[in-house]
Image (cartoon, helix red, strand yellow):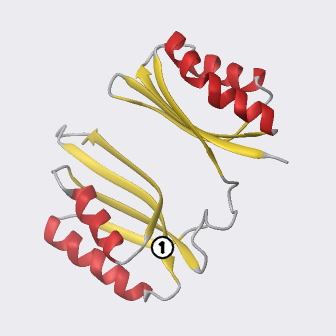
Amino acid sequence: MTQYAVLTAVGEDKPGLVDSISAFILECGCNIEDSRMAILGGEFAMLILINGEKSGVEKVLKGAANVGERCGLTIHSRATRAPGAKGSAKTGAIPFQIEAYSMDHPGIVQRIAHYLAERKINVRALETRVSSAPTTGMPLFSLHATVDIPASEKVAEVRKGLEDICASENIDIEMKPAG
């Protein structure tokens, strides 16, 4: 029976990190099913979902920290359930995309995340970035999220609440069905 585990890793960015971790996972007889990897500042961060036979997943769980130490990464691993398994996704929820843009200032993520949490809206994925405006070089903030809105929520009310927050924070926001 296929088992699953999730690994998180972070450490100073350098060439070969993805190669080392993916080779270790393969040597244990497992497969990378889903992953997110990015350089944040000078650090490289990984979030990896693996699958494999029970013995292979156990090898990954037991050996991940040692492999990370050799690579200069701090790795945490734990068993998890299959994607879509009961309890792993919100049933009766509708996925939506949220995109927000603004001049960068503190509190944008927290204000939006707090509003979503109050309404029991699960954040499935969230990515933020600060870049420089082309002409002025001013810091521009962008947020891209996929959320699960419970079927019991009125989408128009969720949208209106987000728009109210964004109006007070001078943020441009768009919410549309994911897909």
Q: Nearer the viewer, residue 24 or 93?
A: 24
Q: Residue at x 19, y 49 (%)?
A: 104
- Lateral position of residue 85 relative to residue 73, left or right: right
Does dot 1 land on a helix, a strand or a loop?
strand
The residue drawn where x is 47% and y is 20% is: 73
Looking at the image, residue 73 sits to the left or right of residue 40; the answer is right
Classify 73 as above or below 70: below
33 left or right, relative to 21: right
Q: Identify the residue under disc 1.
A: 176
Where in the figure is residue 37, as x and y percent of width and height? Answer: 52, 34
User: What's the residue type where badge 1 is placed?
Assistant: Lys
Q: Where is residue 153 drawn, in percent x and y?
A: 44, 86
Quadrant location of the C terminus in the rendered image: bottom right
Which residue is farthest right? 1
Residue that lies at the very extreme toward the top in this rendered image:
70
Q: Nearer the viewer, residue 17 or 60?
A: 60
Residue 147 x/y as whole percent: 47, 66
Q: Quadrant of residue 160?
A: bottom left
For the point 38% across and 24% down, the residue is 43
Residue found at x 72% / y 35%: 57
User: Position of 51 compared to 48: left or right?
Assistant: right
Asked if one can make out residue 30 in the rendered structure from this viewpoint, the answer is: no
Q: Residues within 10 Å of mark 1 (few under 14, many from 20)?
A: few
Q: Quadrant of residue 118?
A: bottom left
Q: Please tell me which residue lies in front, 116 or 160.
A: 116
Does residue 56 show up?
Answer: yes
Count of residue discs: 1
Say above or below: 97 vs 2. below
